[in-house]
Amino acid sequence: MPAEDVNGSLPKELFARVDEGDDANFYQVPRLVAHIDPGTIAALTQYYRDVLPEGGRVLDLMSSWISHLPSKARYTSVAGLGMNAEELAANPRLDARVVQDLNRNPRLPFADHAFDAVLIAVSVQYLTHPIEVFRDIARVLAPGGRLIVAMSHRCFPTKAVRAFHEFSVEDRIRLIGAYVELAGGFETATFDDRSPAGEDPLWIVTATTVKESS
Ligand SMILES: C[S@@+](CC[C@H](N)C(=O)[O-])C[C@H]1O[C@@H](n2cnc3c(N)ncnc32)[C@H](O)[C@@H]1O
C-alpha cells in the first residue's frame, strides 16, 4: 500500500472497504462469469465500436476473461491487467497479460505513451488509490489517447470503496470526473448514458489526454 495520502484532497474515508484484506485472496478463485446483463455488454461493445480507433493499442485494466471489444474490430494489440491469471488466460482478446494489484502497486508496467486507449469496465469502484492509477494511465496513454471508465450498479460489496455505496449515481459520475481532474494530464471528462432499456445500466465517463503542443 502506498504510504502517502495518494488521493490528494479527497477524504480518505471515501476509500474504506468492508474487506480491507489482501485483494489477492479475494480474487484467488477465477470467476468466469458475466458481471453485467447481455444487453449492457452489447451497449458497451457498441460504445467501443463507436469510439475506439481500429489499429489502436488498447489496455484493458482490471480485466478478466471478457473485454467486451467488438469481435470484428482489429487492434494492433490488446493488453490486459487484472488480479487472476486464469481469468486473463481465458480472455481470447488479450495479446499480453499482467497480474498486478493496483491497490498495492498503482504504477503500470508499461512505457510512456504505449497505448491509444485504456479501458476500465465495471471495476473502478475497487480502486483505493484511484488518483495514482489515473495519473499513471495518463502517462501510458499517447497524447490524445482515451480513457474509458464504464460503470454499472452491481459490485462485490465488500471490496467496493465506501463512496460507491453511499454516493448517488450522479455523485459517482462526478467522482470519476474528479479522479480525472486530480490526476492531471487529461482534458475535462465527459459523460455518456448508454443504459439499455430493462437491463443493467451503463454509465460511461471518458477523457482524452492533453495533446502536446507543437
Ligand atoms: C467485476 S470484475 C470486472 C472484470 C471485467 N473488467 C469485466 O468487465 O467483466 C472486477 C475486476 O477487477 C479486477 N480488480 C479488482 N481489484 C483489483 C486490483 N486491486 N488490482 C487490479 N485489478 C483488480 C479483478 O481482477 C476483476 O477481474
Image (cartoon, helix red, strand yellow):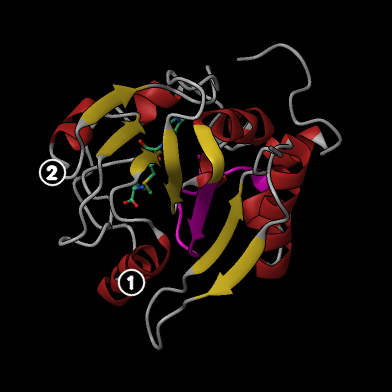
Residue 27 shown left or right of residue 184 in the figure: left
Name which quarter of the figure residue 130 lies in: top right
Q: Is mark 1 within 8 Å of ligand 1?
A: no
Q: Residue furthest right?
A: 9
Q: Secondary structure at mark 2?
A: loop
Q: Secondary structure at mark 1?
A: helix
Give x and y (percent) for residue 194.
47, 76
| Label 2, residues with CA under 10 Å away: few <14, some 14-19, many ≥20 | few
Q: Is residue 194 above or below residue 142?
A: below
Q: Does the magenta run of residues contain 147?
A: yes
Name which quarter of the figure residue 198 lies in: bottom left
Amino acid bearing label 2: Pro
Q: Which mark is residue 46?
A: 1
Give x and y (percent) for residue 85.
22, 26
Residue 87 shown left or right of residue 198 in the figure: left
Residue 71 shown left or right of residue 15 in the figure: left
Residue depicted at x 68% and y 57%: 189
Nearer to the camera, 12 or 180: 180
Image quadrant of ligand 1 equals top left
Which residues make up the magenta segment?
Answer: 145-162
Instruction: Give the Cα distance between marks 2 and 1.
Output: 19 Å
Nearer to the camera, 95 or 7: 95
Residue under label 2, please give it.
92
Amino acid bearing label 1: Gln
